[in-house]
Amino acid sequence: MTGNTQTLQEIRDFQGKYPRQLWSLFFTEMWERFCFYGMRGMLVVFMVSQMGLDDPTANLQYGAIQAFVYAFTFIGGVFADKILGFRKSLLWGALLMIAGGAVIAFSPTSLFYIGTCFFIIGTGFFKPNISTMVGALYHTDDSRRDAGFSLFYAGINLGALLGGVIMVYVGKYHSWAIAFGLVSVVMTISLINFLLTQKSLGPIGLSPMHPDIPASRRRGYEIATYIGSLIAIPFILILVTNTEYTDLFMYIIGPATLVYLGWEMRKFNMQENKRLMAALVFIFFSILFWAFFEQSGGSLSLFALNNLQHSVLGIPMDPNVVNNSSNSLFVIIFAPIIGLLWVWLSKRKLEPNSVVKFGLGFLLLGAAFYVFYSTIFFADADGVTSLDVFTLGYFVITFGELCLSPIGLSLMTKLSPQSVQGLMMGMWFLASAYGQYVAGLLGAGMSSADPNATNTEKLVSYTDGYAQLGLYALVAGVVLVAISPFVRRLMKGVH
Ligand code: GLN
């Protein structure tokens, strides 16, 4: 059967473990994450080595950019729901990212911020909407959905790993202009991949506007959205380059989204609204999860820089390479396996429900932070400790992530009525923006205030912090398991 004749029903009635459209979305997202994590890896190094920023300023700037990237997914989600549909949003997002890479490549130091703004808004239009389309491939009660998201998540991490290594390498050792230019090239690949396969998506992601609205008016709304997002760029530039505005923005955007959701909820029945309340519980807990998890980009990378040996299982290895890539590597290997495990358990009626999976995610997160803490028992007199144990921590944290992050994506698509799917996916990622933000505060609180602290003092201060995070994560896990009957009642039949 040719793809474009498939109805939604036919797409969702697929045989086998995964719908075939998943692969198209897998590769489209893989290339996008290649660029995202490539950019992310380059940001601080570029700002410090090429733009002359000092470390604290570069870190603040990095945090602000990260927060804005995730915060704009909310806006991208809303415009997809109301005007563009998921497909056109994704196309527009990809075009903005291609433009962003080209702008920076043209003159890296002088056009860095303006190009970054294109990237922020482009990711906003792209990121939430591709995940929503994955969810649309399944019937609401299809128990294969979490497995699909797990596989999709492996694609995310494959892109993250390749981009993080290749782009940073090209930038650092060849040319920053080429590295940023690579963003445009790779996003073009992502876009072409999507264009070539989008027909197989049937009606998924087409215009959400009512068919009664005349075509010319619809076109007008779409063009206004495109133009509006371009006009927003100078404003985003002001927000990004003045990090004091980041705080203000973060104080406003979260409550604003809640008010907006409350407004949308008036259209839904009691059952739909209860499910949305359950989605908010998951979103709230995910803020906490990412706040701990994202120590990887901050305190754990400094810990890796100063306090770890340079070998894993006897093989010479830079600790920062382990810090930056082991998690992605573990996800790529284990995400599909965990996904199939959910399907296997579900066939035997043993699959834990989503709330319990979230709880497990936190328990594993807690266990991982206790493993990071335990590095103190392996330290030598210079405060240098085992990279093996540290890597084990990443191994454990990855399983926590796999119980929470792909499941969260899956849940947003299950719990949200069609007309707010983009909004809810945007809120899920907005929680990541808050997580990043809180992660920076936690990391700063953990680092030793004394700039002349010895390695051993740094070790003590970080590992103390990790033990505390471990404890809080365990408590959160227990709370989740304890409230699971209540949340499940809100979810009304969605697992
Ligand atoms: N690593 C995942 C991704 O890049 C999840 C990120 C997040 O939600 N913080 O999509």
Image (spheres, rainbow, N blue to C red):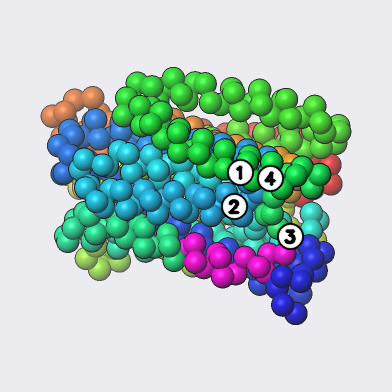
For disc 1, the neighbor class at 10 Å (few under 14, some 14 to 19, many from 20) is many
Mark sitting on residue 324: none
**Circle 3 sits on which residue?**
203
Query: Residue shown at 15%/44% (left/top)?
Result: 49
Dividing the picture into quadrants, the one containing residue 362 is top right
Residue lying at 56% horizontally and 70% vertically, measured from the top left: 196
Is the residue at mark 1 in contact range of ligand 1, meaning its CB lies under 8 Å from it? no
Determine the CA span between mark 4 and mark 2.
Answer: 16 Å
| SS type, badge 1 | helix
Residue range of the region highlighted in magenta in the rendering: 190-203
The residue at which mark 1 appears reads as 222
Q: How far apart are marks 1 and 4 (CA)?
A: 10 Å
Return the residue at label 4.
216
Mark 3, other Cα within 10 Å: few <14 / some 14–19 / many ≥20:
some
Is 485 located above or below residue 400 in the figure? above
Query: Is the residue indicated by label 3 positioned so its CB lies within 8 Å of ligand 1?
Result: no
Name the amino acid, label 2.
Lys
